[in-house]
Image (spheres, coloured by chain):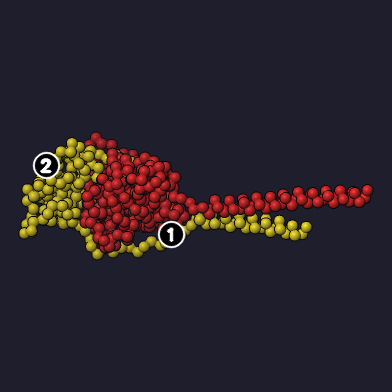
Chain colours: A red, B yellow
Amino acid sequence: VDKRKKDINSDLKGSTFCASGGEERLAIALMLVLGLLITMFTLHPQKASAASITSSVPNTLTYTCLVQHCYGVNTWLGSVTGSFTVIDVVNLASGDVSVDNETWLIDNNSNRSEQCIFAPGDDNNACWVEAGYVRFSGDSERWFWADLRPMGGGCFNHCYYIEHDEGILNSGDYNNVVDITIMANGTAKQWSVSVGGHVTGFNATSVDNTMSPNRIDIGQELAGTQGANAPHANYQDNTWIKNGEHYQTVDGIFNYGGTSYNPPWAGWNQNQRPSNSPYGGVWYTCSLPSNGGNPC
Amino acid sequence: MHLRRLLILATIVLFALTLFGALFAAFSSANATTSNPPPPLNHPKIIYNDGMSAIPPRTNGTLLSATDVQHYILTQPFRGGPTVSHQQPKIVKLQLITSGQASNLLGGEYVSPSESLQVYFVVLSGPFFMENIHVPIGTKIPTANQVVEVFDAQTGNLLLWGIYA
């Protein structure tokens, strides 16, 4: 009887041990699988925010950016006296109208106390000074700047939107950067515009301009319906000016114009946001054919 | 028995290390400060201040004539965009004046570094669909009844264009 009890106990222990060994192995395997899954998900490269906006884009680049242009821009709000950014200079194909890489210094005119209009009777919105490089259909890349200044009531005699197109870019300007500064120059109602490419550039002044800027935009403006090609361009060294120069340290607002499948694509390059990088972040834009994903 | 416990313990330690490593990597990635320092400022050798080439200048160095300007305007599209009707625009004004006077006619707008530069001040009637203007996001592209162009009377360069409403 004792021997049988011992045998039974022994069998029971053995079966217990068998069961424990199986659970242990299962637990170990589960933990290893879990560990692998955690590793895979956390180390998976994060895509830029623009990628989540794109849904489907045809191979041939078409877009609806005529009556209202399309944009991939970032906006910072807040009272400033100037702005600075450094933009990659790349070859652009205009498509049927134009594409540009640029920056705007804007007075949002939120309380509509100023006359920021194209013509008497038009909507009273923002005033601004802008600068960058553009390619129009049938033309080469050029530096440009433009302004829409606050006018007196009813614009007095006339209202004005004025653009100044400068000389074409030199071959040495490409695959380099352009430094763009728009800032109050110390004389009342004057804003200096400085555009410095690697070889060519220009300086100008927006005169008799009473705007009080409270917004900075950087990015790409696309006009037309088809055929543009604008490779990846970065916007770095993003700076606001007021009592000195300051790198942007907040991300601002990702401003996306056009329908959900329209270019331009834009976002923070490799997640280099102002909030987590030391030099004002690195924004990017592009307008390229795509199979549905972000081609930048 | 001891061997099994050791095995379990080793697995737990391995799991904990994997988890810690993965979380550390993810944390580091999200807060990466891998930006390169900004490039040094450019010092361009060529500074433009005379607009873009447009009307061919005269080979003898004399100023362009009003007829030269008129011919260009009626044969080349307005840079800001086409007329709504796709017909030729009408010339409302074509004056040879100084850049300072042109600036006054444009409410103080910058025209040229030199106030005494001879320029052609041209106003055209459309209306025009201003598809080529550059505006901040959210701004509807306007139609303009009248537009303006200012040409350097010597070089024929287009110094500015825009809406003259």
The residue nearer to you, when weighing A181 against A40, is: A40
Q: Give the crowd class for mark 1: few <14, some 14-19, many >=20 residues within 10 Å.
A: some
Residue visible at 66% across and 52% down in the picture: A29
In three-dimensional space, the C-alpha distance between marks 2 and 1, rounded to whole angstroms, equals 53 Å
The residue nearer to you, when weighing A190 against A193, is: A193
- SS class, disc 1: loop
Which residue is disc 1 drawn over? B35
Residue B147, how many percent across, how many down?
Answer: 18, 42
Q: How many marks?
A: 2
- Most distant residue in the right direction: A1
- When asked about the image quadrant of residue A223, the answer is top left
The three-letter code of the residue at mark 2 reads Ile
Residue visible at 36% across and 62% down in the picture: B39
The three-letter code of the residue at mark 1 reads Ser
Asked if the residues shown at circle 2 and circle 1 are in contact, with their CB atoms under 8 angstroms apart, the answer is: no
- When asked about the image quadrant of residue A272, the answer is bottom left
Residue B45, how many percent across, how many down?
Answer: 24, 64
Q: Earlier in the sequence, mark 2 or mark 1?
A: 1
Which residue is disc 2 drawn over? B91
Residue A278, how many percent across, how many down?
Answer: 44, 58
